[in-house]
Amino acid sequence: MRRPFIAGNWKLHKTLAESRDLAQQLFVGTADVKDRDIVIAPVFTALAAVNQVVGDTHIGLAAQNCYPADQGAFTGEVSPAQLKDAGCGYVIIGHSERRQLFSETDEFINQKVLKCLETGLNPILCIGETLEERETDQMLEVLTRQVKGGLAGLTAEQMERIVIAYEPVWAIGTGKTATDEQAQEAHSFIRGLVQGLFTPEVAAAVRILYGGSVKPGNVDGLMAQDDIDGALVGGASLNAEDFLRIIKFQS
Ligand code: PEP
């Protein structure tokens, strides 16, 4: 059985005080939740402050991005080593907003994945097709390229530390969720890709999250699908009540 994994991506939202406050509400609200992984991803500047609330608790801390170097002349960037120092256990890598707005390639994303693994951080690798790619029957090709590109050079042992997030770009922040069936179909395909690249055991163990307008009203149906092991949540993770309901999905 794969342990469910629910992550909140706070994107470019919240002050230090608001971040601490939301983290505290989530900590209190999930005190009795023991059977799933819960991770939150505040902005870089709030990581250390949020770590003071959730560090060494059942709630994990993630960064939303990183630069694939330990240190150096990379103005404006943050390294996996610095994220680890700030209390992170995870890093979201290859989010579609980074691919689209900041032109991140699969090769660059792969460098980040490898650097995080080397540093002892667990990557949450995001993949997903655009609406145009889906409508022109390129979805499987795009997912194949992103999975192979993002995971290039990993050993089976390293793969055990990866979480994959399938996030159809057309469903992110749009209020349009993939149907349970559409999401399951993509997740099953992705698990097959992992099997082809690694082993059946690795594919059976890898957790694949769905992301794209996950809300209290649709999480239960999504989580009931065989190959959906969790959720990466944007908008609905900014509100304690909604995110707590998502964390406490029933399937
Ligand atoms: C995301 O940012 O990864 C995301 C899925 O956002 P939303 O839930 O708002 O669609």
Image (cartoon, grey):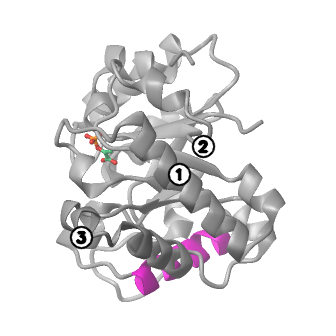
Expressed as whole percent of the image width and height from the top left, the position of residue 139 reads 36, 67
The disc label shown at residue 136, or none: 3
How packed mark 3 is, by other alpha carbons closer than 10 Å (few <14, some 14-19, many 20 or more), is few
Going by the image, does 135 lie left or right of 216? left
Quadrant of the image containing the N terminus: top right
- Please, what is the three-letter code of the amino acid marked with disc 3? Thr
The residue at the point 63 percent across, 16 percent down is 33
Residue of label 1: 187
Residue 144 visible, this angle: yes
Going by the image, does 36 lie left or right of 169? right
User: Which numbered disc flags the more N-terminal residue, 3 or 1?
Assistant: 3
Expressed as whole percent of the image width and height from the top left, the position of residue 57 reads 63, 29
User: Which numbered disc flags the more N-terminal residue, 1 or 2?
Assistant: 1
**Magenta span of residues:** 106-119
- Please, what is the three-letter code of the amino acid marked with disc 2? Asp
Task: Tell me, yes or no, whether the highlighted magenta stretch contains residue 187.
Answer: no
